Amino acid sequence: MRPTILRENSTIRPHGSEIYYEVVGEGPPLVFAHGLGGNYLSWWQQIPFFSEWFTCITFSHRGFWPSIGAPALYGSAAFADDLSALLDHLHIQKTLLVAQSMGGWTCLEFALRSPDRVKGLVMSSSSGALDFQSLGDAEGKMLEEWRRRSADAKKSLDGESILAATGKRMALEQPALYYMYHRLNSLTPLSYRENIRKRIHAERILPLEKILDLTVPVLFVTGEEDIVFPAVAASALASQMLNATYKQISHAGHSVYFERASEYNAVVSSFIERL
């Protein structure tokens, strides 16, 4: 394995924001979009692996450290605008996208707008703005059961001051990873993260019909123990979409890319190889 060497880091300034990005490696472009609890550094376990074969681009969404957001201008549409501006700036016509949680809102919005610019899309612990409330009766019952279990689990974790996005297993079994996640999470102000959480959840109204004919290959990945995003939604969506697959990783919570990096990297790599 070659040393991981930074090729480029800079900022772009779309629509009054400042978006920080980094470029590592050489080869076809592979863009990573982080979740609500992270920033461009969240992919520290993916970049050394994938930069062996790809030009890896990481960035921080507007308002997430160290990027700066435009006042009162955020959400999936603005995030997708920023992604488009970044690709244009880097002269990338078509790319693979890897999204975690909130990043799924960004990347799905971009893929629906510009499917010709997306070679493949990985949706990790996310369905973006898709409204999975309209899934079938069987899935609906499973969702209700998951919500009850999730609410109980979150209440228990709150009492122990453990992040729901990591879960108890990571905190107990991998304390160094948990510490790293916690510190990355804290780099962006809590008030901003909570505003974004409310905004994107309110945007979860996209009808399933909007994506059923999407020709872009999609991989949904979830952790077996996720209490933030329901795995049943990802598996059901993958079964209905034109060109989608689903993988679940055992003994992992919401941040499967962080908690089980080697398994996650292998699953994503296999999906990319099939493309």
Image: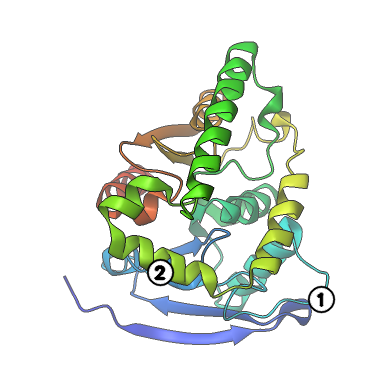
Label 2, secondary structure: give it: strand
Label 1 CA crowd tier, 10 Å (few <14, some 14–19, many 20+): few
Tell me: 167 left or right of 210: left
> Real-space Cα distance between discs 2 and 1?
29 Å
Identify the residue at the far left of this view. Answer: 1
Label 1, secondary structure: give it: loop
**The disc labelled 2 sits on which kind of residue?**
Cys
Residue at horizontal 37%, vertical 66%? 179
* Residue carrying label 1: 71
- 100 or 11, which lies in front? 100
- Foreground mark, 2 or 1? 1
Residue at horizontal 64%, vertical 32%? 213
Q: Earlier in the sequence, mark 2 or mark 1?
A: 2
Q: Position of residue 114 (x, y in %)?
A: 66, 53
Image quarter where the N terminus lies is bottom left
Q: Position of residue 85 (x, y in %)?
A: 66, 72
Tell me: 72 left or right of 248: right
Tell me: 265 left or right of 230: left
**In this rendering, does residue 28 appear at all?**
no
- 248 or 29, which lies in front? 248
Q: Position of residue 143 (x, y in %)?
A: 59, 24
Residue at horizontal 53%, vertical 71%? 186
**The disc labelled 1 sits on which kind of residue?**
Pro
Label 2 CA crowd tier, 10 Å (few <14, some 14–19, many 20+): many
Q: Position of residue 191 (x, y in %)?
A: 70, 67
On screen, residue 171 above or below 56: above
